[in-house]
Image (cartoon, helix red, strand yellow):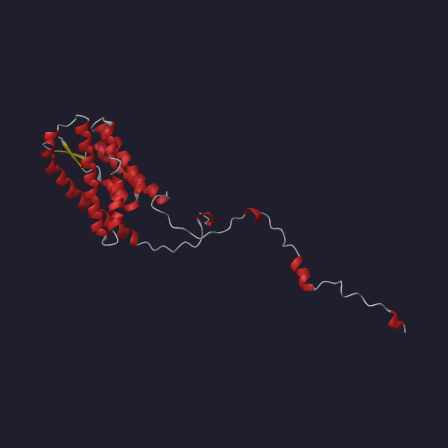
Amino acid sequence: MDEELVEKPAEENTPPVDTVEANKEPPFVAGSADRKIPTPYQPAGPWSLTTRKIVTAGVLAAITIILGISGFGFIPVPNISGRATIEHIPVILGGVLEGPIVGLATGIVFGLISYFYVVPDPFIALARVPIGLTSWLVFIALRRFNRDLAAAVAGIVGTLTNTVLVLTAAVWRGLLPLKFIPTIIPQAIAELIIAAILTTVIARAVYIVQGRFVRAPETKSRDELPY
């Protein structure tokens, strides 16, 4: 009789164990609210600025400055221009190797050297700036067919950009009579050939050196890397 009088606990109001565990709040972890959600690594685009591009731009700008100050970048020739140039080749290489930002940056340095050491005319200095941009556009258009051919044509187009824009600015500013333009054509052809050869050889050497370094693909975003 006594056993019958003992009340059994109400099981209906007791939630299942799984429900209790599911309703528990996760433990607080310090700094977890500030933790960033990892994002997949995205390769740098042509207009992005990376450490390698900054270093390359610095090296090419230094070469441009040395060639200009020392005079090795401007070769005396017996015509009305007075000087042929190889100063534009680092600008072409900047566009070919690292894209438009490095090409434009190196072109600005070339323009400053041209202004302070060759002809103090702002329009002729500005004519040097697009060299790297046109070289890059030609190179990316042709590299899928043949990289050496693309580098050679980029050297030619970059040189033509320099020659055409500088001569146009010089004639427009009254610094060069139009009738003397034909006398500069042999010099322009020589600059085209030299630029095509040097751009192809140097670009090929850089690609060979870069190919010797094996790099594992990045699996983390830049923010998650410890360096």
Judge left or right: residue 14 versus residue 84: right
Residue 61 spot, x, y in % from top left: 28, 37
Residue 44 spot, x, y in % from top left: 37, 48
Residue furthest bottom as drawn? 1
Query: Residue 165 appears in which quarter of the rendering?
Result: top left
- Pick the front one: 171 or 29: 171
Say which residue appears at 22% left-offset and 28% top-offset: 117
Residue 110 spot, x, y in % from top left: 25, 34
Count the marks: how many?
0
- Pick the front one: 59 or 120: 120
Say which residue appears at 18% left-offset and 29% top-offset: 170
Query: Residue 87 appears in which quarter of the rendering?
Result: top left
> Which quadrant, please, contains the N terminus?
bottom right
Is 51 drawn above or below residue 78 in the view shown? below
- Pick the front one: 46 or 204: 46
- Pick the front one: 73 or 5: 5
Residue furthest right as drawn? 1
Residue 33 spot, x, y in % from top left: 57, 47
Judge left or right: residue 37 versus residue 107: right
Say which residue appears at 28% left-offset and 37% top-offset: 106
Judge left or right: residue 40 versus residue 166: right
